[in-house]
């Protein structure tokens, strides 16, 4: 095959400025690759495209496709010097895209860096919410996708991925999209790149703040396409945010801090009332906030990675409503992974500093190895690791 000279990302979740950074486009271009992003959201997820669009970076390589025919023509015009990163799951709606890649025999990579305790919820619990979602929504496409997820892709006319991007030691090597000929590229989760950049900056003064790692409950757009969307009704929001405000009052009283909200990247709090009682809410500053904070408060946010990397105490919280949802098990698993138990914000009357602000270093190191970055892998930005490997291909 020809030497790789062009890298194309296939996405179906409204490419945005955050993705531009996470995909390391500047790093890849700096290594001599032509980089493009092909966004298939308009025809693969039209509802999400219409309702959840975000600002797109000024990037000449960004291409937006509105019809499958346009995408088909573009894929069939790729040459063997092209390399594709498929940043979309194999589903009934994406089958045609993967089938075309196979037809052209284009080298492609799938991602396995996204791994954290929440994903280890017991299969019987996940199955219940899956079935419940189908019954409530009548979404029978999920049945097809569930069946497809259990069939090796080569049985469906899809060439297995040439490469698999792995992260922590607990990376799940799904046999659906890879086989024995798939090469593993050991990298790390995206958050580690942010950490590498952050620790190069001057050490900030520690501030008397606690940081809430917001998950934009219950409005997160990603839930519209998953079983999580059936976990609680939208009426949950009013009582949830009232309980959050009350809990923050208790935290500030007992721990002598001010709570600051690290808003979820996809949040749009400008569309809602003041849910946090006038507290400071910041977008895009999570890692710097965690670095200078006394501790973090979280349900089961991926951003707990920053607390682990900076060795900050984590207070895990749940609520009466969350305890009736699939989040209950996920929050427990995340808390247990760091040696903690969740606090129910609907029942707590005070905070025990000795208990809640403890850091179990052994657990933190284990978490880092399992879910963020496998021990003894390269201390380089993720996309520099990838670029080094692709430059060696012939």
Image (spheres, grey):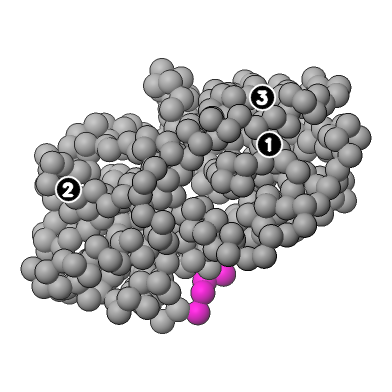
The residue located at (22%, 36%) in the rendering is 175
Q: In the rendered picture of this protein, how many numbered marks are placed on residues?
A: 3
Q: Where is residue 198 in the image (x, y as percent from the top left)?
A: 59, 61
Q: What distance separates the C-alpha of mark 3 from that of mark 1?
A: 13 Å
Which part of the image, by quadrant, shows the C terminus?
A: bottom left
Residue 313's disc number: 1
Q: Which residue is labeled 2 in the image? A: 182
Residue 44 appears in the picture as rendered = no
Secondary structure category for the residue under label 1: loop
Quote the CA–CA distance across marks 2 and 1.
39 Å
Left or right, residue 78 beside residue 306: left
- Asked if residue 205 can be seen in this view, the reply is yes
Nearest-to-viewer mark from 3 and 1: 1
Report the residue at 30% width, 44% height from top.
Answer: 91
Q: Is residue 293 left or right of residue 377?
A: right
Location of residue 351 in the rendering, given as x and y in whole percent from the top left corner: 82, 26
Relative depth, front residue between 29 and 391: 391
Disc 3 crowd, CA 10 A, few/some/many (<14, 14-19, 20+): many
Q: Which of 281 and 224 is in front in this view?
A: 281
The residue indicated by pointer 3 is 342
The quarter of the displayed image where residue 203 is located: bottom right
Please tell me which residue lies in front, 135 or 34: 34
User: Do the residues bearing badges 3 and 1 touch, measured as CB atoms within 8 Å?
Assistant: no
Q: Height in image: 100 above or below 55? A: above
């Amino acid at each position: 095959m020809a030497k790789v000279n062009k890298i194309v990302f296939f996405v179906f979740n409204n490419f945005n400025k955050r993705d531009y950074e996470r995909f390391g486009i500047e790093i890849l271009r700096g290594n001599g690759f032509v980089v493009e992003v092909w966004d298939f959201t308009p025809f693969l997820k039209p509802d999400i495209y219409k309702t959840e669009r975000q600002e797109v970076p000024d990037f000449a390589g960004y291409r937006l496709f509105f019809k499958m025919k346009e995408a088909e023509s573009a894929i069939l015009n790729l040459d063997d010097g092209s390399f594709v990163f498929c940043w979309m799951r194999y589903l009934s709606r994406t089958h045609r895209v993967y089938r075309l890649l196979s037809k052209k025999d284009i080298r492609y990579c799938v991602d396995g860096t996204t791994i954290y305790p929440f994903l280890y919820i017991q299969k019987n619990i996940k199955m219940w919410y899956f079935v419940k979602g189908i019954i409530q929504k009548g979404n029978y496409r999920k049945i097809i996708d569930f069946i497809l997820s259990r069939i090796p892709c080569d049985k469906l006319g899809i060439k297995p991925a040439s490469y698999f991007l792995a992260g922590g030691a607990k990376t799940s090597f799904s046999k659906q999209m890879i086989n024995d000929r798939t090469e593993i590229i050991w990298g790390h989760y995206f958050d580690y790149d942010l950490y590498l950049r952050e620790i190069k900056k001057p050490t900030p003064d520690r501030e008397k703040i606690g940081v809430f790692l917001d998950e934009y409950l219950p409005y997160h757009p990603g839930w519209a396409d998953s079983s999580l969307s059936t976990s609680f009704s939208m009426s949950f929001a009013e009582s949830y945010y009232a309980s959050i405000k009350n809990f923050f009052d208790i935290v500030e009283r007992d721990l002598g801090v001010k709570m600051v909200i690290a808003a979820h990247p996809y949040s749009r709090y400008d569309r809602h009332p003041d849910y946090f009682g006038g507290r400071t809410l910041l977008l895009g500053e999570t890692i710097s906030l965690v670095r200078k904070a006394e501790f973090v408060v979280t349900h089961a946010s991926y951003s707990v990675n920053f607390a682990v990397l900076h060795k900050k105490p984590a207070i895990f919280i749940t609520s009466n409503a969350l305890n009736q949802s699939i989040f209950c098990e996920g929050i427990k698993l995340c808390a247990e992974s760091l040696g903690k138990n969740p606090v129910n914000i609907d029942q707590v009357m005070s905070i025990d500093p000795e208990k809640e602000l403890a850091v179990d270093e052994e657990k933190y190191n284990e978490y880092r190895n399992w879910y963020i970055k496998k021990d003894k892998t390269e201390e380089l930005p993720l996309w520099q690791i990838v670029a080094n490997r692709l430059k060696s291909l012939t």
